[in-house]
């Protein structure tokens, strides 16, 4: 089948390459000429495990092409996927300008039936706005070509995106037109072989399903973070509590890790956008508000702990930071907890020596050259001349370091672990101090 994808970011590229991999002819469109030039020259603008190789193979097979020309995109595919960003507006609601710009482009250029498939995370009711934008663009050129708008939210996880797309837990198709539902079912058939994962539902329920999923996951994290703060206050160990509650199958072990807050391009903005939607309809979403508020506080927690440890005297100190991406296996630093910590350290007059396995080019792009930050060649050299180490992202390569070398390198001999990846016993045996989340410090 012929498929066009508008937006060649994390979602668009992964969707495009996976649909090409199963035999479709896919054209990816992006407004960013540098991104398209890079893709056309064999480069890949983001880090996602397995993506480079799949892009290379499918380009070589002639099934995957890239362009900045929306007209070419509209001509190409029966399916017109929308996978552009929906960043938060100033009031927290989702900014739909990119989604609606694509809808207008499609309306401006289409001359036969098209199916607009919305993969971007958008508030309930957006499909109607997309349809209105297409109709408006069509009527400006005096045409009325038939089309459908489908909500097909994406549930991939950065860092495991290819696998998530290839072996999805569910494929949500929101449409009021059974014929369109069948066409989407056919497109997704290669990913739906082991048992039926396609769930066809009305458009609004599909749109809300995505927000509900992210809000639920964010709630689990904030709940555990709230409990971790209580655990610290009462002298309990949150890691023991985690194992204790996870053993109940109704709770389960997944996604109940305490830490220094969630980030990324989805949870923060989606919780805020859902809260905003609810408020705009006169409903006070108290729980969603608390989820976000707890996370906001939690992202500041590591800085508070560092500041307390050094009795507020951070000026002139150097803090080593391990992990800059918002989670392992991605270079994405949108709303990453590392940014909150680093910026607070700078504000307090401290310097940072940081290392991340893949997110350092992104760090450079965000912060540029600075005298108060050095990006180190590897994890251990990030500790050179540092007073303390802060762990922000639980990359596997950080999990089992040589604590004696760390002890020798760190002037103040203290680790602040924002992801609880270390065993306090092992650290204290090495003579280090250890401050983590929801557990008694080792001092
Ligand atoms: P992204 O910022 O990585 O990519 C968006 C791309 O769209 C950019 O390359 C941008 O240049 C391009 N773009 C903007 N306007 C365009 C236009 N008019 N025509 C063509 N391209 C255009 O975003 P992302 O992380 O891929 O997210 C896209 C959507 O998917 C968002 O709504 C997000 O919430 C949702 N989502 C993201 C993830 C994730 O893990 N990143 C997971 C599920 C859903």
Image (cartoon, grey):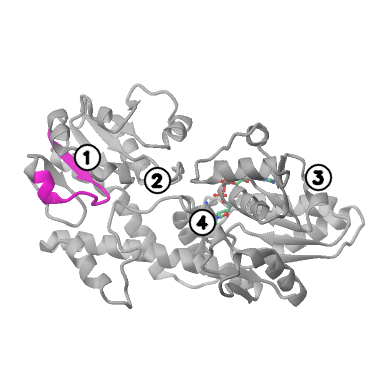
Q: Is residue 441 visible?
A: no
Query: Is residue 219 toward the left or the right of residue 71 in the image?
Result: left
- Residue under label 4, please give it: 163
Disc 2 target residue = 336
- Whichever of callouts 2 and 4 sits on the residue coming sooner in the sequence is 4
Q: Secondary structure at mark 2?
A: loop
What secondary structure is found at the residue carrying circle 3?
helix
Instruction: Please give the name of the residue rendered at 29% of the width and 60% of the height, measured from the top-left corner.
Output: 257
Q: Which residues are magenta?
A: 412-428
Q: Are marks 3 and 1 in contact (CB under 8 Å)?
A: no
Q: CA distance from mark 1 to mark 4?
A: 29 Å
- Mark 2 vs mark 1, CA separation in Å: 23 Å
x, y percent for residue 302: 25, 46
Q: Which residue is mark 1?
A: 401
Mark 3 and mark 4: Cα distance apart in space: 29 Å
Chain-order first, disc 3 or disc 1: 3
């Amino acid at each position: 089948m012929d498929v066009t994808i508008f937006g060649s970011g994390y979602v668009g590229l992964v969707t495009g390459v996976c649909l090409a991999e199963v035999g479709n002819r896919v054209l990816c469109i992006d407004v960013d000429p540098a991104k398209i030039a890079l893709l056309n020259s064999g480069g890949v603008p983001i880090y996602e495990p397995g993506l480079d190789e799949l892009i290379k193979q499918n380009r070589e097979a002639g099934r995957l092409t890239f362009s900045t020309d929306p007209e070419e995109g509209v001509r190409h595919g029966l399916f017109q996927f929308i996978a552009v960003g929906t960043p938060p507006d100033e009031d927290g609601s989702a900014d739909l300008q990119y989604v609606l710009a694509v809808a207008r482009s499609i309306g401006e250029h289409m001359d036969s039936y098209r199916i607009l498939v919305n993969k971007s995370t958008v508030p309930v009711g957006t499909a109607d706005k997309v349809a209105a934008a297409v109709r408006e663009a069509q009527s400006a050129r005096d045409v009325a070509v038939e089309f459908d708008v489908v909500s097909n939210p994406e549930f991939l996880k950065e860092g495991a995106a290819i696998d998530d797309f290839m072996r999805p837990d569910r494929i949500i198709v929101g449409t009021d037109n059974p014929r369109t539902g069948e066409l989407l079912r056919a497109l997704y058939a290669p990913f739906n072989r082991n048992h039926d994962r396609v769930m066809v539902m009305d458009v609004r329920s599909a749109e809300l399903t995505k927000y509900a999923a992210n809000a639920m996951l964010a709630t689990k994290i904030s709940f555990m973070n709230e409990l971790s703060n209580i655990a610290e206050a009462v002298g309990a160990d949150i890691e023991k509590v985690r194992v204790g509650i996870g053993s109940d199958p109704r709770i389960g072990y997944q996604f109940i890790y305490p830490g220094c807050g969630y980030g990324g391009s989805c949870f923060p903005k989606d919780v805020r956008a859902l809260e905003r939607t609810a408020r705009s309809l006169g409903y006070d979403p108290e729980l969603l508000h608390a989820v976000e508020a707890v996370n906001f506080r939690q992202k500041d927690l590591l800085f508070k702990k560092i500041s307390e440890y050094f009795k507020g005297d951070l000026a002139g100190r150097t803090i080593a930071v391990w992990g800059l991406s918002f989670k392992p296996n991605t270079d994405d630093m949108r709303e990453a907890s590392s940014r909150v910590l680093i910026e607070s350290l700078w504000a307090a007059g401290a310097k940072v020596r940081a290392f991340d396995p893949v997110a350092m080019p992104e760090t450079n792009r965000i912060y540029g050259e600075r005298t108060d930050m050095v990006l180190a060649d590897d994890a251990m050299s990030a500790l050179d001349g540092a007073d303390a180490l802060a762990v922000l992202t639980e990359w596997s390569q950080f999990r089992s370091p040589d604590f004696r070398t760390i002890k020798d390198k760190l002037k103040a001999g203290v680790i602040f672990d924002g992801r609880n990846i270390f065993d306090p016993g092992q650290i204290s045996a090495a003579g280090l101090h250890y401050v983590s989340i929801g557990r008694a410090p080792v001092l």
